[in-house]
Amino acid sequence: MQTTHTRAIARNPGIDLLRGLSILLVVLHHTGLRIPLKKSVLAEFLPARLLGALNYNGYEAVFIFFVISGFLITGNALRRWGSLDQIDMRAFYARRFARIVPCLLAIVATLSVMHLLGVGDYVINRDGQSLPRAIFAALGLHLNWYEGMTGYLPGGWDVLWSLSIEEVFYLGFPLVCLLTRRSWVLAPLLLAFALTLPWTRAALEANEIWQEKAYLPGMAAIATGVLGALLVAHWRAPRWAIHAFQWVGVCGLIAVFLFEGLLWPWLGEGCMLVLTFSALCLLIACDQRSLLGMTKLLPGFGWLRAWGRLSYEIYLIHMFVVFAVVRAYKAAGGDVAYGFLWYLPVLPLCWLLGAAMERWLSTPAERWLRGGSFPVPAYRDL
């Protein structure tokens, strides 16, 4: 396959904004499970539907990350090698290793030490689980399966489930591209796979944890992003189509985030398809706006784009902040009516810790693993 246009993927503010929204929802979700906004005094002033949307869309946000990952991985591969059947497998795996593994090793090591020290919220004590087995699952690409079979791990470990899905995708992606070799062969397969999302989730409803974290639903979302990257590599949308994609995407995400309860009787698991394809519409709009020089930024959202730039690091470290703040909240009396005030330190602390990890670990380690002579790209895939 020869792309119509290949180009470097510079930082795209729209994609950063979508990533920022997604990681923000993850942090709010894990905070809200412990300090729910709907029980605070905010419920007297704000709609319960809005407060619920802020607290309970973290899982959906992870699926948006999956779509973004497939989109960016594919777009960057097309830029580097011109076509997917020309992917250099060794270089692809080396880039993925350099980006993911240093931070992952640091988090697993930290969690292990805290377990051994007996720190509350970090001790693995469920029957059938152990520290060596959790480490093996986290580094062996199957922590999601391990939780599905044995139950939830402590929160710091639990967030690593999505990495198991992404890492298996990374392993298989170059192989699938080299085997199919032509986009006209790959695209229909991707579309069929993307559309399986509701059925693969429904088929796993007997095990709630595995239904949430199984490989196939997550990879169906990633396939949606790959499909979108192939589309924009061959097609330049007119302005009217860009606006249409943008509004369809925005309306679709609002529908899922705010009105999923109303949609569920009609669509059931199909709500997840609305979510993933709405995210894809926004990615296509962001990509095509960039091509046409439509770079006007939404004012007041620079902080959220900054979150998007650090989304991987914040995702890995945010539970340390959440657990610390929740402990302080309980020590102060745990007044749920004013629990929303405890969100105020959570957000800046997550960003600061993520920024520190990016500055002092992920970027230096990635640069060192890539030989030092290669600059870390402005827009990394994850």
Image (tube, helix red, strand yellow):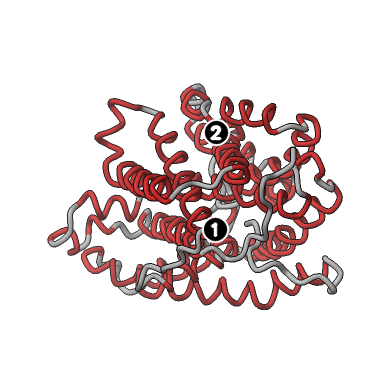
Which x, y percent locates residue 258? Answer: 28, 46
Q: How many marks?
A: 2
Task: State the quadrant of the N terminus.
Answer: top right
Q: Is residue 298 left or right of residue 131?
A: left
Task: Give me the disc on residue 312.
Answer: none
Which x, y percent locates residue 253? Answer: 36, 46
Q: Is residue 228 left or right of residue 380?
A: left
> Tag 2's secondary structure?
helix
Task: State the quadrant of the C terminus.
Answer: bottom right
Q: Quadrant of residue 37?
A: bottom left
The residue at 47%/68% (across/down) is: 305
Q: Quadrant of residue 322?
A: bottom left
The earlier-in-sequence mark between 2 and 1 is 2
Mark 2: amino acid: Pro
> Viewer-proximal residue, 136 or 48?
48
Which x, y percent locates residue 121? Answer: 52, 59
Mark 1: amino acid: Leu
Cβ–Cβ under 8 Å for marks 2 and 1:
no
Q: Quadrant of residue 298?
A: bottom left
Q: How crowded is the residue under tag 2: few (<14 C-alpha within 10 Å), some, or many (20+)?
A: many
Q: Report which residue position mark 2 lands on.
A: 217
> Is 170 rendered above or below residue 363?
above
Q: Is residue 73 left or right of residue 154?
A: right
* Closer to the eye: label 2 or 1: 1
Q: Report which residue position mark 1 lands on.
A: 291
Q: Residue furthest left?
A: 44
> Tag 1's secondary structure?
helix
> Viewer-proximal residue, 280 or 310?
280
Q: How crowded is the residue under tag 1: few (<14 C-alpha within 10 Å), some, or many (20+)?
A: few
